[in-house]
Image: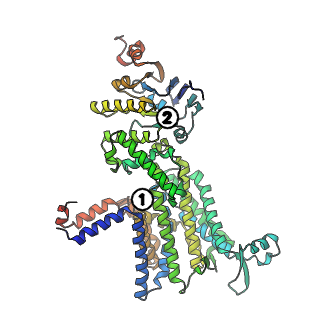
Amino acid sequence: MTAGAPLLEVSRVSKRFGGVQAVREVSFRVERGTVKGLIGPNGAGKTTLFNLVSGHLAPDAGEIRLRGKAIQGRPPHRIAALGLSRTFQSIKLFGHMTALENVMVGRHVRSRAGMVAGMLRLPATRREERAIEGRALEALDMLGAGHLAHKEAGSLSYGQQRAVEMARALAAEPELLLLDEPAAGLNIRETAELTAQIGRIRDRGMTVLVVEHDMSLVMGVSDEVAVLSYGEKIADADPPSVQRNPDVVRVYLGEETC
Amino acid sequence: MTTPAASAWSRAAAALRRSARLQLLAFAAVLVAAQLLTRAGGKEFLLTQLTMAGYYTLVVLGLSLLMGHAGQISIGHAGFFAIGGYASAFLTTLDLSASRRLPVVALLERLHLLVARKDLYGGEALGVEPWAAFLVAVGLTALVAVAIGVPVLRLKGHYLAMATLAFGTIVGSVVVGTQRLGAADGISGVPPFEVLPGLRVMGGAAGRVANYYVAWGLVALAMLLLLNLIRSRTGRALRALHGAEEAAAAMGVDVARLKLQVFVLSAMIAGVAGAFLTHFNGGIGPSEASILKSVRYVAIVAVGGMGSLWGTLATSAVLSFLSLRGTFGSHDDAVFGVILVAVMLLAPDGILSADLRALWRRIAPAPRSREETPR
């Protein structure tokens, strides 16, 4: 793999649902060690694009490369194994498991004990279990949720669930972290905290792709921002340029203001 | 106000909740106590039904893993039980003595994979050695489970239920319709299975106590393995896919593969139980393959509480024993059907679920002093 290749490269990807063209020939790149924002009005195709990248949907056309490997149409668990981890717009925690167990599932790709090893609880398996637990606790602590470790995930508040879900994604130590509207439902203080957390995540060398409605969050954390409208990309640049882009202004504020 | 004894009791109860090892020790104590009670009461014959109940409990534990933890249903587990049982019975009652001149048969006999035994009429017969037959039977069960599981586990909910029901029906009718499997009479004259030197799985008063411990020892072993499994990496993945399949996949869990693994494991456990019980009973009949048996297993898991292995074990031990003792008379199958419907309507999480415990607390509130005790 060449050093200059982007971590994620999406090329002319399209996806249609019945009569709706959700994503039309969208291309963008995410460079290693950066935070890329993906914004657009409701129904612009952001979440669809996200699901295409994570493998939860297969594109009709186009190519998606992660670490140089074509991943379009591969199942999610294979893409996860390549170093991609994500959160969901509507939080998807394992409600009947504790916060810690949730985050431990995040370590799945970074551990290997199979079914038989699990039943026999061999010494190597037990060592691995302890390591998984240690890393999971670290991830919870990093998001300030260490004290929730033994609470059932379903019983946590919305903000706490967001933190646990993010810890779960982080526990995989992914090369690329996909955050799907992480600020949805958070108050101003929590959003500010989240902004700082995303900065810390990038400082640890992770690459982040974030879909978001909250402008202050996206403009605050992103190195680059791509803008979608009706399934097409209309802008892709650094935040100040995007904010000045007349097409973007038109989409967000209406025709007359520009 | 609490007495020291009461607080020691609650500490012990808390320790028991946490430690699987303690749970198994307590279970072993209960097993020994039950055996000693039958001896003291002069009712050792009860051990026969208890032993059989143990093997049915084994089936139900495997099914509980599948239904309660992985969220898959199978209304065809009697089919897997029957494959294990019939394969063992068929192989061990074969008579290949007429084919001794065939090199394959001679070789197998030299390897002790074929052994001579007395048949029902006192003549000499050459059949497959029970251990070899057992391994083939369990392997066959696993193979069938894979073959069924690959297409069927793509289905969800009612469709999965229908498909496994169909599988169970097919096994049932194949068994009844096949002369080599004894058709409606089943296979009898199955020889003892010498599991360890001197330890034979067989009926009769002589080996009653030993067989009781073989059956329930297997249950305890399965319990240990399954409890380990549930809190392992694979077990977490299982519970995760039950909760949110999409998120589990996003975390790298190969959902299809894991479902298949658990399905096959649970089928193999049923196959093991079928093989052992067949040796214990000295035979197997088509009723073991009937769909009513499958429904019964599902009913027991439902009563025990989805996802509670100990609850399932206790329920199965009691209900299977009562059924084998003839308590339900000719309404036996109807009783389990009614139980299943009642549980699904009234307490879908199982009788031993938290809701009913709350109800019980309302009916029989704890003494006040308890609630004021600081922790």
Residue at x 41% of width, y 17% of height: A242
Q: Is residue A134 left or right of residue A84?
A: left
Q: Which of the chains bears the disc numbered 1? A: B
- Which quadrant would residue B189 be assigned to in this image? bottom right
Q: Position of residue A145 (x, y in %)?
A: 33, 42
Residue type of the residue flagged with mark 2: Glu
Q: Which residue: 34% across, 64% down? A: B15
Q: Secondary structure at mark 1?
A: loop
Packing grade of label 2 (10 A; few <14, some 14-19, many >=20) is many
**Residue where numbered disc 2 is placed:** A175
Residue B295 in the image, given as x and y percentages of width and height:
48, 65
The image quadrant where one finds the C terminus of chain B is bottom left
Q: How many numbered marks have been drawn onto this rendered protein structure?
A: 2
Q: Say which quarter of the image contains residue B195.
A: bottom right
* Residue sitting nearer the eye, B82 or B6: B6
Secondary element under disc 2, as helix, strand or loop, is loop
